[in-house]
């Protein structure tokens, strides 16, 4: 048979696209080589959040006295934490498999490779079987980037150098953990293992942690880490990895730090090799599949969504890109917009950001006004965050007085940031937002408070 759609890769982009296509009546085949749910469900977003929640609960027991609660003898059982994480993953993966079935999606397990095009359509080979489709969605995602640092490869073979894959299943808490790269993944793992009892050191080449996050917020986050005992080496370049230590250079000086385990978290690269893209001439640009605003590649009927297009590398972006692709395949005009995609760091305290930062607004020549207030303007924040030092910043376009960015550090930021995203997406002006009623007392009121500063 000729399928209406074949989806290559069963992560957030691939499984959601398959569900939506199946629901709309397209005959759909999903090919997944490893595990349905992709990186996000199996070795990314979900397992890391399960670990971080256990750390948060443990932290509360350790610091309960701040709230008049004394807990004696609390401990974190890492094996039990990992077992619970596995249970969470299994529950969610089972749910996705059920949704695929419900939407009549055929699933084939195996490594898919595009082999060419005939008059019937695109051909994809899996386990020596060839499948044909009218439309193809490439959703092969991304994999960890391991830099050619001397000793890194050997360390991976011997098991003391880890990527996000292995660290989430580590069967013990290492005495010392060095994290190469202070981006979101590195920071989240630093947060968990610091709470669990490791001596954690982050080595970051830039002069700040958390990548493109608002600089003031990344600074507050770093201070929170340091208060908890995490060492952060900024402006430092790892030059060698040995069994038991990491050698780095800072200000022309060669230094080293003890490391029972080393996590490589310097970034991820799109999976574009070994999948046969060249057989049909799909254009690759700087290591990613190039797509237009509809998710279509340079080849008619061939789409790409998720990390493989390299645009945002977040699961929620992958979901929306997948929907845009399917809608366009179904003849419904739909366009991907990237101006209001929230990003979150699920540490304790949490960070939530959406839209322009001061840096990006300046780069784009947007004239803006800014309000920058303490999270302590929120009654609930004060009640629940003894000694909290969070802030909330909002940026509005000076000419139209529209909200263009919101950035905050403080718990619940992960849950409330989408509200600011809606305001940006719907181009709400300061005066419109002032008319919205927020529930009281909530941390989300901080947005209202910040807007009233303008
Ligand atoms: C530790 C960690 C934490 C993260 N936390 C978050 C978070 O909190 N929030 C967030 O939004 N994002 C997070 N991310 C990023 C998120 O996981 C990705 O953005 C998301 O998984 C991308 O989805 P995808 O469908 O594009 O690709 P993937 O999830 O990578 O899925 C691609 C799938 O394709 C399969 N595949 C590849 N090649 C083939 C082939 N030839 N044949 C068949 N199958 C193939 C792979 O096996 C994989 O299952 C995190 C990532 C990591 C590593």
Image: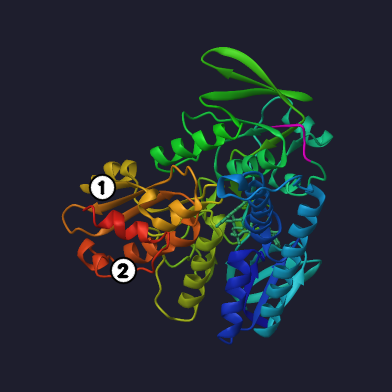
Considering every residue shown, the one lying at the far top of the view is 253
Q: Which residue is mark 1?
A: 370
Left or right, 29 with respect to 217, comes to: right
For the residues labelled 1 and 2, the Cα–Cα distance comes to: 19 Å
Residue 12: x and y, percent?
60, 65
Q: Which residues are magenta?
A: 173-177
Question: Marks 1 and 2: which is nearer the front?
Answer: 1
Is 175 contained in the magenta span? yes
Visible residue check, residue 311:
no
Residue 403: x and y, percent?
28, 58
Q: Residues within 10 Å of mark 2 (few under 14, many from 20)?
A: few
Is 360 contained in the magenta span? no
Tell which of 74 and 400 is nearer to you: 74
Marks 1,2: beta carbons within 8 A? no
Left or right, 64 with respect to 207, comes to: right
Label 2: which secondary element: loop
Write down which quadrant ligand 1 falls in.
bottom right
When the figure is inspected, residue 93 is found, relative to residue 409, above or below; the finding is below
Considering every residue shown, the one lying at the far left of the view is 399
When the figure is inspected, residue 104 is found, relative to residue 270, above or below; the finding is below
Label 1: which secondary element: strand
Q: Which residue is mark 2?
A: 426
Q: Residues within 10 Å of mark 1 (few under 14, many from 20)?
A: some
The colour scheme used here is rainbow
């Amino acid at each position: 048979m000729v399928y209406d759609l074949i989806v290559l890769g069963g992560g957030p982009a691939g499984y959601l696209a398959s569900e939506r296509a199946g629901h709309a009546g397209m005959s759909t085949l999903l090919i997944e080589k490893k595990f349905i749910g992709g990186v996000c469900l199996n070795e990314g977003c979900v397992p890391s959040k399960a670990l971080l929640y256990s750390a948060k609960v443990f932290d509360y027991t350790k610091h309960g006295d701040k709230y008049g609660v004394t807990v004696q003898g609390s401990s974190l059982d890492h094996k039990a934490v990992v077992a619970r994480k596995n249970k969470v993953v299994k529950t969610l993966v089972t749910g996705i498999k059920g949704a695929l079935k419900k939407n009549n999606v055929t699933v084939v397990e195996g490594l898919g490779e595009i082999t060419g095009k005939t008059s019937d359509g695109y051909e994809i080979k899996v386990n020596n079987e060839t499948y044909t489709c009218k439309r193809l969605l490439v959703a092969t995602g991304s994999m960890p980037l391991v830099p050619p640092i001397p000793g890194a490869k050997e360390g991976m073979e011997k098991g003391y150098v880890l990527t996000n894959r292995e660290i989430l299943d580590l069967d013990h808490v290492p005495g010392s953990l060095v994290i190469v790269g202070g981006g979101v993944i590195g920071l989240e793992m630093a947060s968990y293992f610091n709470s669990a009892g490791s001596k954690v050191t982050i080595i970051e080449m830039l002069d700040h942690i958390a990548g493109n996050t608002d600089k003031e917020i990344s600074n507050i986050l770093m201070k929170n880490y340091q208060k908890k005992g995490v060492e952060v080496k900024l402006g430092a370049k790892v030059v060698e990895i040995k069994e038991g230590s990491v050698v780095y250079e800072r200000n022309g000086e060669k230094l080293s730090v003890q490391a029972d385990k080393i996590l490589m978290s310097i970034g991820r690269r799109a999976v574009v090799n070994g999948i046969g893209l060249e057989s049909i001439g799909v254009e690759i640009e700087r290591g990613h599949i190039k797509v237009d605003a509809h998710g279509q590649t340079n080849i008619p009927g061939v789409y790409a969504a998720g990390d493989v297009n390299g645009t945002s590398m977040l699961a929620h972006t992958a979901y929306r890109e997948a929907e845009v692709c399917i809608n366009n395949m179904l003849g419904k005009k739909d366009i991907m917009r990237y101006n209001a995609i929230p990003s979150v760091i699920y540490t304790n305290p949490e960070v939530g950001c959406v839209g322009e930062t001061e840096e990006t607004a300046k780069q784009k020549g947007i004239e803006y006004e800014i309000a920058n207030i303490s999270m302590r303007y929120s009654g609930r924040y004060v009640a629940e965050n003894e000694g909290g030092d969070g802030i909330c910043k909002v940026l509005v376009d000076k000419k139209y007085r529209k909200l263009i960015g919101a950035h905050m550090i403080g718990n619940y930021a992960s849950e409330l940031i989408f509200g600011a995203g809606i305001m940006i997406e719907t181009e709400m002006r300061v005066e419109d937002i002032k008319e919205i009623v927020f529930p009281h007392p909530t941390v989300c009121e901080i947005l209202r408070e910040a807007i009233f500063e303008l």
